[in-house]
Image (cartoon, coloured by chain):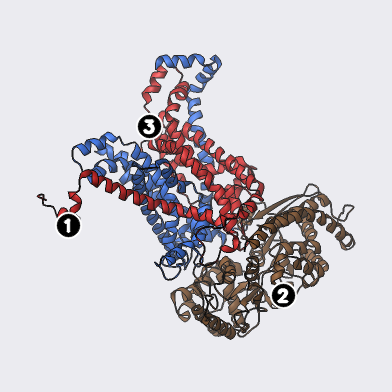
Chain colours: A brown, B blue, C red
Amino acid sequence: MAMISERYGIERRDALKVIGSAAAVGIGGVAGCLGGESGGGPTTASSSDGWPDLSGQSVHFITVAAEDSIQDLWQGVASDFENDTGASMEIEFVETGDLTRIIQLLQAGDPPEVSMQSIGEAYQLQNRDVLLPVDDEYERAVNKLGKPTESVKQIVTVDDSRYMVPLFHNLNSYTYRSDLSDIVPDTWEKVRQYAREVDDQDNDVRGTYVPIATGSPAAVRMVSWLWTNGGSISEWEDDTIHINFHEGENRDRMVEMLNFLKERQQWSPLGEGADWADLMNVLQSGTAASTWYAGARAKNEAIRKGRPFAKDIDITPGMPHNRQQVSDGSAEGLIAYQGADTQAAKTFINYVVRKSFVVEMLTKLSPIHNVPSYPEIQQGEEYRNNIQSLDIWEGWTEEQFDNYQVQTLEQLQNKTQETSPPNPYTSTYYSEPIWNLQNEVLLQDKDPEAIIDTHAEALQQIVDEAQN
Amino acid sequence: MPAKHEEVRRRVHPYQESLYDVLSKRWIFVGLTVLPAIGLFAFINMLPMLWALTASFFEIGALSPEWHWVGLENFRIVLDDGKFWASLFRSTVFAGGSVALQVTAGTALALLLNRDFKFKRVVRAIALLPYIVPTAVLSFIALWMGNSRYGIVSQILHQLGLIEQFIPWYGSPELAMFAVITTSSWKFTIFVTIIVLARLQSIPSSLYEAATVSGASAYRRFVDITLPNLRGVLFIVVLLRGVWMFNKFDIVYILTKGGPLNKTTIASIYAYRMAFDQLNLGRAAAVSTLLFLLLLGAAAVYFYYFEPSEEVRVE
Amino acid sequence: MSIASSWEDGPLGFWYELPYQTQKKIKNVLLNVLLAIVLVLILFPIYWMIATSLFHSNDLFTLPMPLFPSDPTFVEYRAVLETEVVQWYTNTVLVSAGIVLLTTTAATLGGYGLARLDIPYKKTFARVILFGYMFPPILLSIPMFIFWRQLGLINSLPGIILAQTATTLPFSLWLMWQFFQTVPYSLEESAMVGGSSRFRAFVDVALPMAKPGMIAVAIFSFAIAWGAYTIPSILLTDSSKWVLTLGLASFTEAESVLWGQIMAASTLFVLPTFFFMYYLQKYILEGFRAGRI
């Protein structure tokens, strides 16, 4: 028992050691990459080694990076960038992925050059005309990292301009213990059967988990399950986004989905006050046997904690479906800002978006859980070797890994992609009405039919505000 | 005294003495004493406040630095919003409940500590400790102890047979408000304890002795001696704690994010969402301004009716 | 039993037959029991913080959790010490010291001036001071960030000291103003009659007598400075400039929370303050005692 937590401590230390060498590797990596760069690069004024001379310019880069190893990785690439271009780098690690710091900087009239943001946030910024198109940078990324999937290709494209270079995704799927039942819960009906069967067994493990949350877990859950039931939340009505989950067939789909959540509560441990951490821990702690999760953390956590059933935790390819096979997932990537040092910003994006760096980042930043946006990276030897040398790989099988990273990625549809063109207001409308609608059903036993209109109206009002 | 004073005086260097004379000139002295405080106050307190007050008359998108004058429009919209009034009501419940709990528990604890018992110094150090435990630390401990499935509080109550199921302290619509009030009061009650205990110690014991000799019961001594002496501190403690709890944001947001079912969406969380989720800074500023005016009005009434010095003069 | 009283005839009637000394003793024991219960309520969260920091990480999120770390491990402390925690600790101490110094100085001088000098509108000002707390602080982060950035005070310890003083100054100034009103002016007057300059009288006579008030102000501002989070999170963006509270929050990685490390860091954060309360309680109580409040 002690060994596992020792290992956890060591992992951190090992990571620090690795960084020492990573800095060296980083420089080598850049050198290796330069040959290609100077050939296909733009014809701007270049210094001798292929990168433009950015002396006197500065790059302010903001990213979420709590782990030391990730911070060191970014610091390493930043100092390489300074050496190669003469620009000065200011890296800022924020603790949450929201827009708080960006808002402060924009209000101060001093936007950063580049930041790593989710697709929803990128749309929020683009709606206010703050972002810089990065079409060229995206093209180069595709040249270097390979073709992305159809879904990834559309990410943050507005009026034929592209505003984000995507890097990775967390994919919604269903995580379950295969040692307790032979049922594979890949449809709603089987989710029910699985939950009932496991819950009836003579042990403390509950069949499934229905979290009751305020905030993002509730919003992400709603989209994930609703779509697999063929429902939708919004549509374009001329030039405006119209909430439609309470209309026509959608209404039935939504009501059915809410009742499905409600029904599963009988096989679930207490769901109140849940946060992402509760979802992540519900399997490893032996509390429940199956849960929906936005990614692979529920399994990874069981492996880290050395649970004997960790290897038996399987992941369904995509979400369990009822009418439609589709998986909502996040998308994170790099965006650049207007009114900042635009040349430096674009150069920095080009500089970091290269195979060696992206692979290294995705090996360190929640590995396996974060899925590369580019299948070539993900199927490449470099990434696979890195992943397979991780401690957590012990708990994974090739099949489980493919179920999550390959098959689920193929079903990816981001919450913005419900409509075509994508709905740019999803971040704003992921708010109170969405989680209160579910919670009134789950906490207060309210009839979905009776409350659906009120919440739809409230949500429409919020979207209208955002569209003005 | 004068002799000693002379002695001190002789040790001072003549230049220092003339420097002192210069510093004593009326306006220089005023500048030296009051000006730094006023200047600081104006810069670090008033200036950001003025920014926010001004902002409440403009439409300001959080993602662009442009301001558009809209007059009282923000106020009109906010005052029209039922959710604002609901959040205001919750703020009142939160502040009222917190102040009631903190002032009674804090005073009671101070009375308990103001006696003779063994290990007095250690016991007092322990009792006063929560006030200095950072809110961030307290929030983490509370989330950890109150977790709906792994929380040690539920576990112990369960093991003692007092509850059948784990209690989701911060996730239950019925309990969440009570839980956040109790959690934050664990720390802030001690502010009351410190101030009341300090005051209790300054009440001359001769007063109590005289009362005891003349046959006053413990209850009478409390009502006739202790309470009147505490009046002044309780006045200021209720005011300060009331203001601080009314504007509290961090600990409530960390513990519940305003949920479940908005049961703990107090006005500060409503304003926060307005600014950082709905990205409407002008309207969030209007909410802040309204809360400010409300507190100002409440404080004025409070001062008018309860300020002790005024009453002393009347009597 | 000759005195007719409903209380004494009741089930607790025996109480009044006990000798006064015995009554007093029993009361005292009961009050001590009550105090002990309160102490348990205060100590348990602190105990659980320490216990969690010593558990092996796979004992966490299990049911039932052991109540005592029977096989304590210091792995979490080692992990914490590998971060920049020493730097954060140093910064926290420096920032707290700066805030205490700035607040105490400004509040003492200001409080004296307001109490003693004939300045127009001083009474109004003295009352307005506490209004400084009445504006909800949520939104003030934006103007503060803008102003401090223009002044180049982002990521600077003096910058954070200045900003955080906004939360300590109003009450401190108000307290010192009250305090000086209780210090008799006659002593300073007699010093001035004896030939002292006004400033001398302030330094030699008034200041020594104001000491308890200054200590109270220092302690109040320390308690706020030590745990400051919101303002530092806005103004300190470089992790080498962080204070401990920010470091603490960084032990939450994405959606997971490293409870062991958080609790280990919290323990390192909280324990020294116990000694602060132990050794300084005399001054704390003396300081807040004074003043007209």
Task: Report helix, strand or loop for mark 3.
Answer: helix
How far apart marks 2 and 1 lie (CA) works out to: 76 Å
**Amino acid type at image mark 3:** Gln
Residue B298 pos. (x, y %)? 37, 50
> Which quadrant holds residue C208?
top left
The answer to which of B110 and A163 lies nearer the viewer is B110
> Which quadrant holds residue C76?
bottom right
How far apart marks 3 and 1 lie (CA) works out to: 51 Å
Residue B242 pos. (x, y %)? 40, 50
**Amino acid type at image mark 2:** Thr
The residue where tag 3 is placed is C181
Q: Is residue C88 above or below residue A36?
A: above
Q: Is residue A109 left or right of residue C35?
A: right
Q: Nearer the viewer, mark 2 or mark 3?
A: 2
Q: Is residue C54 above or below residue C119?
A: below
The residue where tag 2 is placed is A397
Protein chain holding label 2: A
Whether residue B286 is visible here, answered yes or no, is no
Residue A442 pos. (x, y %)? 48, 75
Task: Report helix, strand or loop for mark 1.
Answer: loop
Quadrant placement of the C terminus of chain A: bottom right
How far apart marks 2 and 3 lie (CA) works out to: 77 Å
In the image, are marks 3 and 1 on the same chain? Answer: yes
Protein chain holding label 1: C
